[in-house]
Image: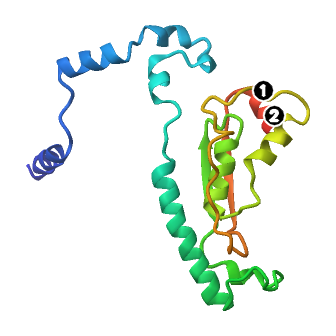
Amino acid sequence: NNNNNNNNNNNKNRPPDCTLNQLKKVRRQLRPDTCFEAIEAPFYQTCSFTQETKCPDVTNYLDEYYQELQQEYLEKTIATTGNGDKDIDTDIDTATYDIMEAFVGLSVGCNKGFDALNTLRRGTFDASLSKHDWGMEMTKDGILHQSVCAQNVTLSFQVLPNIVQPRKGTVHCFEPVPATVKKLQ
């Protein structure tokens, strides 16, 4: 009996299921017809669900969050070293800069790697990570096909100019298209 009370309490917090009319409205807006055809070639991105959900603009809140985190990192660095200028000895024991845990990022559907690079730049506050340089390296041995969401031309995360030592970090890139995986390697 107590278990039933817990289930009822959990159901009160959960939103109700969609009504039939709501489901029909979603179906009219996101026609699934092309999705069945797209199963054989998903990389063409013709499914209506993909069309409506690809290229989300999440940079607003992410950039804001990482700007605040970057400021905190800078303040801790200044407090640790006693100097916020780039003129300090960069051979200072790197343990001095272990004031934040290392950044770990995941990029699922990495495409050409531009978002992953910007994620790493955002998480490590490393101004040396450049989309332009990345693009040049990616085209060095041939053509780089257009990025789906034009990530190569979106603005890079703005790193504060007085970050002396970038935060440690890595990004793991998950990409299903074999030709792109080969290019990224």
Image quadrant where residue 75 sits: bottom right
Q: Residue at x 74, y 55 (%)?
A: 129
Percent position (x, y) of residue 167?
Answer: 67, 69
| Amino acid on which disc 1 is placed | Ala
Q: Crowding near pointer 2: few (<14 within 10 Å), some, many (20+)?
A: some
Front one among 160 and 124: 160
- The answer to whether 171 appears left or right of 50 in the picture is right
Residue shown at 37% from the left, 17% from the top: 30
Side (left or right) of 15 relative to 79: left
The residue singled out by tag 1 in the image is 179
Secondary structure, mark 1, is helix
Q: Position of residue 147 (x, y in %)?
A: 68, 31
Task: Give the x, y percent position of residue 178.
Answer: 75, 27
Indicate which disc residue 183 carries: 2
Element type where label 2 sits in the image: helix
The image quarter in which residue 143 lies: top right
Q: CA distance from mark 1 to mark 2?
A: 6 Å
Apparent side of residue 143 relative to residue 62 in the rendered image (left or right): right
92 on left or right of 72: right
Are the residues flagged by discs 1 and 2 in contact, CB closer than 8 Å?
yes
* Residue type at the position of mark 2: Lys
Q: Is residue 139 above or below residue 127?
A: above
